Image (tube, rainbow, N blue to C red):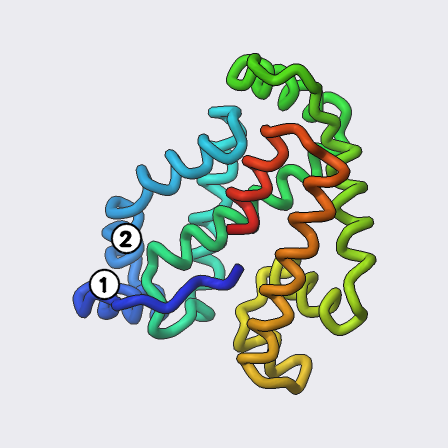
Amino acid sequence: MRPFKECVDIAEDRLMDQLREGNVRAYQILYNRYGVLIMRRLRALVLDSQAAEDLHQELFLQIWEHRGRLPLNVSFRAVLLHRAKLLTYKYYQRASKDHQLRNQLLVHATELYDQLNEQLSFKQTSEALEKAISKLPPQRQQIFRLVKMEGKTYEEVASICGISLSTVKDHMTRALKFVRVEMAHHNPSAFVLFLLGEIFS
């Protein structure tokens, strides 16, 4: 999901303008303001503290490297939360293909969710997600991939596809609903439903 528009504090708006211009001090202020919040969010999403720290570092590095492309009229908090979800999604994609990482995740999942009787197969989850996406109509599938897997904003997707912003929003609403239903059908585990709710909310 793209960063949602919300009221942007004037002081923060000025800091973001300075950040776009490469002002290190503005970057440090924004990092100090939101660093802890994003770390808590990542730890809740990936369960593993070290992985969360790695993603946290990667996220803020991306912010600096792509500072000139920060969206306008969107709060810095919204931008960070959006990127955290995108990085988390890619992390679980990698986990589905990495045997050692998958086992580590299963250990952490067992520690935190030992009340669940079913074991989670990350490979199965990834395959089920891809299968669900492939069932979407061609244009809806393209829009979903652009937003969820490439991190494009709704505005960027509308421009790429040559359609209106409202059409993009409608496609994403329908796509997300369909994917959630498909994933719930293939992965009834409460943990999977929780994970999907966090990533796709």
User: Residue at left 53%, top 59%?
Assistant: 1
Amino acid, disc 2: Leu
Q: Is residue 28 above or below residue 160?
A: above
Label 1: how many Cα within 10 Å (few below 14, some 14–19, many 20+) = some
Compare residues 190 and 16 and report the one nearer the observer.
Answer: 190
Compare residues 80 and 180 and report the one nearer the observer.
Answer: 180
Q: Could you say whether the residue bearing mark 2 is in a helix, strand or loop?
A: helix
Q: Is residue 165 above or below residue 150?
A: below
Q: Which residue is mark 2?
A: 30
Distance Cα–Cα, label 2 vs label 1: 8 Å
Residue 2 position within the rendered picture, expressed as x and y whole percent measured from the top left: 50, 63
Amino acid, disc 1: Glu
Horizontal arrangement in the rendering, residue 64 relative to residue 114 (left or right): left
Label 2: how many Cα within 10 Å (few below 14, some 14–19, many 20+) = some
Residue 44 position within the rendered picture, expressed as x and y whole percent measured from the top left: 45, 32
Horizontal arrangement in the rendering, residue 16 relative to residue 86 (left or right): left
Q: Is residue 78 above or below residue 37?
A: below
User: Residue at left 74%, top 34%?
Assistant: 96
Q: Is residue 129 above or below residue 96?
A: below
Q: Quadrant of residue 70?
A: bottom left
Q: Which residue is mark 1?
A: 12
